[in-house]
């Protein structure tokens, strides 16, 4: 199957950003530290699973944005993860749990942030 450029799919960037926010928030809930060391692996894994590509600089930008959203914006939309909440974010194969209301709220926050970010910086 052919690998496609992520920018050609309307919701793919928001989906990837949401996945990165969820993994970042989950890591914080489990460790108590805002760690970004897993960001590269999480991004590569999501892109590979979805057969998409994204230039490395855009990956870095999305990773920074994910950390910002997880640290600052989740509480603003009523999301405060605890250890007990982490398992509900993901399916058994580490995809986002699309039935989770928390995941839906994260995705909305990501879409909103991406819209603002694109407008302000002309990105993507």
Image (tube, grey):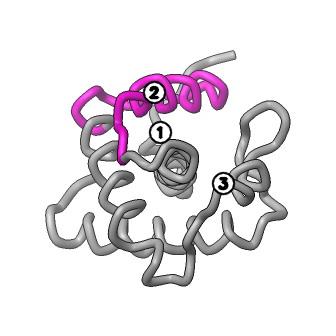
What residue is pinned by disc 2?
53
- The image quarter containing residue 69 is bottom left
| Direction from residue 80 to residue 49 in the image, left or right | right
Residue 31, position as x, y percentages in the image: 50, 42
- The image quarter containing residue 84 is bottom right
The residue most toward the left is 121
| Direction from residue 95 to residue 14 in the image, left or right | left
Residue at screen point 34% across, 46% down: 62
- The image quarter containing residue 49 is top right
| Residue nearest the viewer, comparing 60 with 9 | 60
- Residue 54, numbered circle: none
Q: CA distance from mark 2 to mark 3?
A: 32 Å
Residue 105, position as x, y percentages in the image: 61, 74
| Residue nearest the viewer, comparing 113 with 120 | 113
Above or below: residue 12 compared with residue 50 = below
What residue is pinned by disc 3?
83
Above or below: residue 56 compared with residue 66 = above
Secondary structure, mark 3, is: helix
What residue is pinned by disc 1?
6
Asked whether 54 falls inside the magenta stretch, the response is: yes
Asked whether 27 falls inside the magenta stretch, the response is: no
Residue 50, position as x, y percentages in the image: 64, 31
Secondary structure, mark 1, is: helix
| Direction from residue 121 to residue 95 in the image, left or right | right
| Residue nearest the viewer, comparing 5 with 58 | 58
Secondary structure, mark 2, is: strand
Residue range in magenta is: 34-58
């Amino acid at each position: 199957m052919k690998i496609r450029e992520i920018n050609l799919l309307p919701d793919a960037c928001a989906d990837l950003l949401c996945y990165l926010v969820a993994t970042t928030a989950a890591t914080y809930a489990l460790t108590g530290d805002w760690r970004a060391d897993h960001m590269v692996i999480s991004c590569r894994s999501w892109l590979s699973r979805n057969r998409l590509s994204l230039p490395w600089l855009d990956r870095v930008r999305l990773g920074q944005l994910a950390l910002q959203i997880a640290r600052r914006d989740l509480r603003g939309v009523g999301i405060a993860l605890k250890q007990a909440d982490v398992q509900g974010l993901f399916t058994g194969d580490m995809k986002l749990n699309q039935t989770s209301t928390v995941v839906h709220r994260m995705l909305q926050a990501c879409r909103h942030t991406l819209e603002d970010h694109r407008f302000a910086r002309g990105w993507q």
